[in-house]
Image: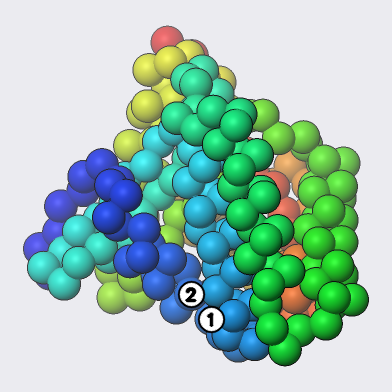
């Protein structure tokens, strides 16, 4: 399958969100469907808002993969007001979900907060980070993910970044990152990962130290 890598465009959002849903099987873990849509929006759009590096893989069938990342040495495209607006839209969409009790909605917000609290005990946000990397299953053995990753690392190195981190699940993509030179710096209990991957799932942070020019 012939592919090209190009800059992410706003028109790519729906295709990227669909890839996220397929890869992590959102519909199996988040119900009703309206709640699934909100969770998928928070995960996908939130990653875009926190990124200043965004590339997609395009095949003759459309978007087949993407990487959203944050280079700490460059400003985010989204300003502070846009980030606040995103959070407000997320809350509004969540509380308008029907067939879902207010108690369950509040519990989900609590899950998000506990995830961030537990993660911050390993490392607070602010470092250069791979926010979201998704590759269509048919391309996963063709080094496409590694290629996107190398482009992001090159961008970071050009700006003097010393390390890149990524959050992943120990039972999911940790092996891929280890093969790419990442080392685990700590793991943590995440109710969010458990919600998506099952009870007992552990989240982890990995880092890749970059050579200094």
Q: Secondary structure at mark 1?
A: loop
Q: Secondary structure at mark 2?
A: helix
164 relative to 109, above or below: above
Identify the residue position indicated by label 2 in the image.
Answer: 21
Q: Residue at x 58, y 85 (%)?
A: 33
Report the disc number at residue 25.
1
Q: How is the image coloured?
A: rainbow
Report the disc number at residue 66.
none
Of residues 97 and 48, which is closer to you in this image? 97
Q: Are marks 2 and 1 in contact (CB under 8 Å)?
A: yes
Relative image position of residue 7 (x, y in whole percent): 26, 42
59 relative to 120, above or below: below
Q: Residue at x 64, y 58 (%)?
A: 90
210 to the left or right of 36: left
78 to the left or right of 166: left
Which residue is outermost to the top?
A: 213
Q: Residue at x 47, y 68 (%)?
A: 20
Of residues 158 and 25, which is closer to you in this image? 25
Relative image position of residue 175 (x, y in whole percent): 55, 61
């Amino acid at each position: 399958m012939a592919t090209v890598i190009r800059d992410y465009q706003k028109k790519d959002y729906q295709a990227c969100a669909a890839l996220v849903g397929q890869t992590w099987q959102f519909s199996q873990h988040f119900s009703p469907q309206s709640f699934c849509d909100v969770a998928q929006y928070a995960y996908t759009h939130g990653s875009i808002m926190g990124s200043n590096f965004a590339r997609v893989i395009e095949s003759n069938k459309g978007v087949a993969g993407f990487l959203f990342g944050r280079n700490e040495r460059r400003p985010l495209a989204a300003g502070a007001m846009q980030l606040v607006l995103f959070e407000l839209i997320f809350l509004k969409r969540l509380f308008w979900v029907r067939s879902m009790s207010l108690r369950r909605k509040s519990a989900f917000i609590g899950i998000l907060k506990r995830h961030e609290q537990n993660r911050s005990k390993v490392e607070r946000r602010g470092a250069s980070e791979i926010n979201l990397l998704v590759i269509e299953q048919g391309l996963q053995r063709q080094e496409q993910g590694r290629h996107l990753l190398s482009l992001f690392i090159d961008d970071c190195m050009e700006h003097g970044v010393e390390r890149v981190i990524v959050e992943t699940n120990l039972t999911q993509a940790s092996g891929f990152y280890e093969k790419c030179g990442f080392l685990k710096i700590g793991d943590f209990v995440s109710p969010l990962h458990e919600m998506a991957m099952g009870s007992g799932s552990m989240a982890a942070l990995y880092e890749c130290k970059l050579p200094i020019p």
